[in-house]
Image (spheres, grey):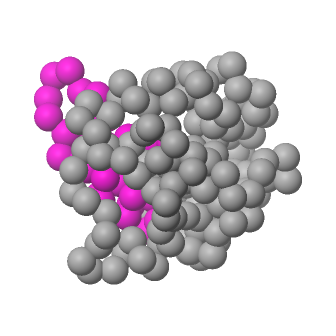
Amino acid sequence: MEATALTSPDRLWSGQEVLTRPSPVPAVPGVYGWHFEQPPHPDLDARCLLYVGIAPRYMANRTSTQNLRKRVRYHYRGNAAGSTLRLTLGCLLGLELRRVGSGKRMTFGKAGEATLSQWMADNARVCWVERGEPWALESQLISQLDLPLNLAQNGHNAFHSRLKELRAQARQRARELSISA
């Protein structure tokens, strides 16, 4: 039932809708799923579930303050340093990853992140299910569904090695460039 709520949701939400106040995304734990009007890579399908994420993540030694609302909103307007989904999408779209700040963090820079945010506004749609301890459902979904944009726990996916390599190449290029302002 929960998998169907993500693979064939009754409704998908745009960034514009999610970022309004009050946001329709509940401030509770759960799993969120991303669908795309246009896929970020030609080998991926449009209008189907390509990625799942959770909020909060499992933390054995402390309590996370994350929830569905914070995570989904961050994916739409944050940066690649704090969103593996944004990092993946930017790499697939060919944006240039750069070291920023002290040089440890990597983002697509101000212009690249703005380009990515606009692409997501145009193409990314999200749905969610509320769920206590969402990491259990995330593991189940990754093992059972074709989720090409998930890397963790997803080595069996046909797109995994290509995505992992693309991200590694982007990080290597970023290390070779000067730190961006």
The residue under the point 50% across, 47% down is: 6
User: Is residue 58 shown left or right of residue 50?
Assistant: left
Q: Position of residue 14 (x, y in %)?
A: 50, 72
Whether residue 155 is visible: yes
Residue 163 falls inside the magenta stretch: no
Q: Residue furthest left?
A: 62
Percent coordinates x, y for residue 130 in the rendering: 30, 46
Q: Is residue 171 visible?
A: no
Nearest the eye: 169 or 59: 59
Rendered view: 84 above or below 107: above
Q: Quadrant of the N terminus?
A: top left
- Number of numbered labels in the structure image: 0
> Which image quadrant for residue 180?
bottom right
The reply, left or right, for residue 117 in relation to residue 93 is left
Residue in view at x 39 percent, y 43 percent: 31
User: Of residues 78 and 138, which is closer to you in this image?
Assistant: 138
Up-down relation of residue 14 to residue 85 (above or below): below
Task: Name the foreground residue: 139 vs 104.
Answer: 139
Which residues make up the magenta segment? 52-77
Percent coordinates x, y for residue 110 in the rendering: 53, 72
Task: Name which residue lies at 14% across and 34% down.
Answer: 63
Residue at (58% x, 36% y) in the render = 150
